[in-house]
Amino acid sequence: MKLTKDELKNIGFFDNYNDEQLKIFIGISSIKEFKVKDILFEQYDELSDVYVLLSGCLSLGISLAKEKRIRLGTLEEGQLFSWSAVFSPYISTAWVMATCPTKVLAIDAKKLNLEFEKNCEFGFKTMSKIAQTISHRLSDTRFQLMNQLTL
Amino acid sequence: MLNNKNIYKPIRAKLTNVIDESQLIKTFVLVPEDKFSFKTGQFIELSVDGIGEAPFTPSSSPLVTEKLEVTVMKTGYVTEYMHMLKPGVEMGIRGPYGRGYPVEKFFGKEVLILGGGCGLAPIRSLLYALEDIKDRLVKVILCYGSKTPADCIYKPLFDRLNSTEKFEAHRTVDKADEDWDGSVGVATTLLNKIRINIENSVAVVCGPPIMMKFGAIRLLEMGYKDDQIYLSMEKNMSCGLGKCGHCMMGEFFVCKDGPVFTYDEIKHNPEIWR
Ligand SMILES: Cc1cc2nc3c(=O)[nH]c(=O)nc-3n(C[C@H](O)[C@H](O)[C@H](O)COP(=O)(O)OP(=O)(O)OC[C@H]3O[C@@H](n4cnc5c(N)ncnc54)[C@H](O)[C@@H]3O)c2cc1C
Ligand code: FES
């Protein structure tokens, strides 16, 4: 199943892309669905897709040992995650699990990287957005840490 | 305008109800001896006879003058004593003081409100004021974070806002319990899910100092300009009138020049996040 251009425009991450650029995303992505307790990926898995949460609920966390999952937080609709799929060594830094029926847009990361090489403007825009996502995650984590320290 | 004829003399108010909001937070419903007006975001000095006084921002609607609500977190001497008070006692009120939210500047705009912990108290008053002028606003989005679901105050407020035209309200908790199926993460994570036209928007941040800092930084990253961000600053106060200097933050008297400032006004102040 594919999203249309208009549907993509309603998702925060795809703000500021023109129609041509949205078409690139449509060509290299598909919709995936997950049930409650489905694991989208584990920490240290090799990743091939970058995801955007379309609807549903996802928890994100880290594992200390196999049995011990620490839940760090939830992802919000429209949010991009599993960005490690775009950068070498393509290994995930966290696990993500569905906590209610969930739909995500899965973007093929290898194809996305090829598009970056072909189309620098598209590549720069997308990498900037991914960098911003990582920066927000980092500052949220610092904020969370400060909160814990001052509890 | 001050409600007291003598600026140092409190007017009397009867405590008519005490509402438990969370383990550490209670709302005190007060009926002043005379009508009491304030602008949303201004603060009052509330006194307990024989104990002392402390500054609080009313959490009730600025349109209601017969009754005043103040939501108080137990943090120390005065507030601990207040938490033991029962309806029927009399208290003192001085004020209102300071500069509140310039709601007229929000006309025609989208208003994003980021709140945390007891910061929802002044925000609730602001929300009442914004509901009253909602025809002149584009939309209002509230993003609020509390430590746990049990620490979240004014729970019915969220459903009410979500069923009010032009308003949407989101909640998150730092740490979930078994019954919680909402967002988990600090308040700023909610900014990932909202859609807002930043150019035509103002943002209001109110909460604990850590949240104010990370909230302001995140809004700047999102593209807000310094003068689009309103911060409600809390500094230790005494007179509330710009006389004693207790609340000084650089060249500003927070009690008189604030407590609401734009980020632009105070960003160079080294004491801003202290
Ligand atoms: C303009 C303004 C509006 C406020 N609005 C509210 C409100 O709506 N609800 C609410 O619960 N609180 C509010 N506060 C904070 C409230 O005034 C303090 O919590 C209160 O003064 C503490 O008094 P106390 O005697 O119980 O604590 P104290 O025994 O004096 O102190 C206990 C601890 O609280 C800290 N503290 C004292 N005053 C402040 C302060 N102003 N800000 C931060 N920490 C402080 C002290 O440093 C100390 O660590 C506001 C403060 C200001 C300046
Ligand atoms: S509290 Fe006295 S000058 Fe501000």
Image (cartoon, helix red, strand yellow):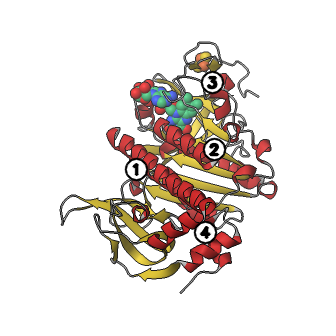
Whether labels 2 and 4 share one chain: no
Res. A61 image quadrant: bottom left
Judging by the rendered image, the residue that carries numbered circle 1 is B147
Horizontal arrangement in the rendering, residue B130 relative to residue B92 (left or right): right
Judging by the rendered image, the residue that carries numbered circle 2 is B204
Q: Which amino acid does label 3 sit on?
A: Cys
Q: Which of marks 3 and 1 is in front?
A: 1
The reply to whether the C-beta atoms of the residues labelled 1 and 4 are less than 8 Å apart is no
Measured in 3D between alpha carbons, the distance from the residue under mark 1 to the one under mark 4, in whole angstroms, is 29 Å
Judging by the rendered image, the residue that carries numbered circle 3 is B255
Q: Say if residue B55 shows up in the picture.
A: no
Residue A11: give its label: 4
Sequence order check, earlier mark of 3 and 2: 2
Measured in 3D between alpha carbons, the distance from the residue under mark 1 to the one under mark 2, in whole angstroms, is 20 Å
Give residue A133's position: percent from left, percent from top.
50, 55
Q: Which secondary structure, mark 4?
A: loop
Please tell me which residue is depicted at 64% across the width and 20% down the height of the picture. Answer: B252
Q: What residue type is labelled 1?
A: Lys
Whether labels 1 and 2 share one chain: yes
Q: Which amino acid does label 2 sit on?
A: Val
Q: Which secondary structure, mark 3?
A: helix
Give residue B119's position: percent from left, percent from top.
53, 43
Please tell me which residue is depicted at 61% across the width and 66% down the height of the picture. Answer: A14
Horizontal arrangement in the rendering, residue A74 relative to residue B218 (left or right): left
Q: Which of marks 1 and 2 is in front?
A: 2
Q: What residue type is labelled 4?
A: Ile
Residue placed most toward the observer, A133 or B236? A133
Sequence order check, earlier mark of 1 and 2: 1
Q: Which secondary structure, mark 2?
A: strand
Q: How crowded is mark 4: few (under 14 residues within 10 Å), some or many (20 or more)?
A: some
Res. B156 image quadrant: bottom right
